[in-house]
Amino acid sequence: MTGDFLKVTPASSFCTIITVCRIAWLAISSTREYTRRVVSKSLDWTDLRVLDPSRGVLNRQVEALKLLKDALGPDIPFTQDDL
């Protein structure tokens, strides 16, 4: 083992684009703009749905991590940054 490891850092909007907002990519400034928030009042929290980690954004992230694991092999540990 060489002491190497990999830290995966998803987009800062990763957790929020799943349920609580919609974003638009601003190519000119290379940033994201939040265009709509699903939660705008406290009662909105009760309307959030249970997410299926085998679909959508969550599934894409899990699949990306699986690909990294396969490519890195057993000798290089990795973790995903906890946003």
Image (cartoon, helix red, strand yellow):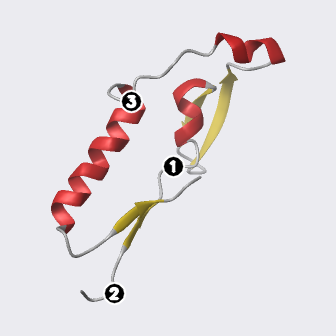
Residue contact between numbered discs 2 and 1, judged by CB atoms under 8 Å = no
Identify the amino acid type marked 2. Answer: Gly
16 w.r.t. 12: above or below: above
Which numbered circle lies on residue 53? 3
Please name the amino acid that badge 3 sits on: Pro
Q: What distance separates the C-alpha of mark 2 from that of mark 1?
A: 26 Å
Mark 1 crowdedness (10 Å alpha carbons): few <14, some 14-19, many ≥20: few
Question: Of circles 3 and 1, which is in front?
Answer: 3
Q: Which of marks 2 and 3 is nearer the N terminus?
A: 2
Q: Nearer the viewer, mark 2 or mark 1?
A: 2
Residue 83 in the image, given as x and y percentages of width and height: 59, 52
Name the residue: 61% across, 51% down: 29
Q: Is residue 27 left or right of residue 39?
A: left
Q: Which residue is drawn at 72% across and 18% down?
A: 45
Residue position for label 1: 11
Q: Locate residue 32 relative to residue 57 in the image: left or right.
A: right
Q: Earlier in the sequence, mark 2 or mark 1?
A: 2
Q: Is residue 44 left or right of residue 53?
A: right
> 27 or 76: nearer the eye?
76
Residue at label 2?
Answer: 3
* Snapshot quadrant of residue 58: top left
Tell me the amino acid under the disc marked 1: Ala
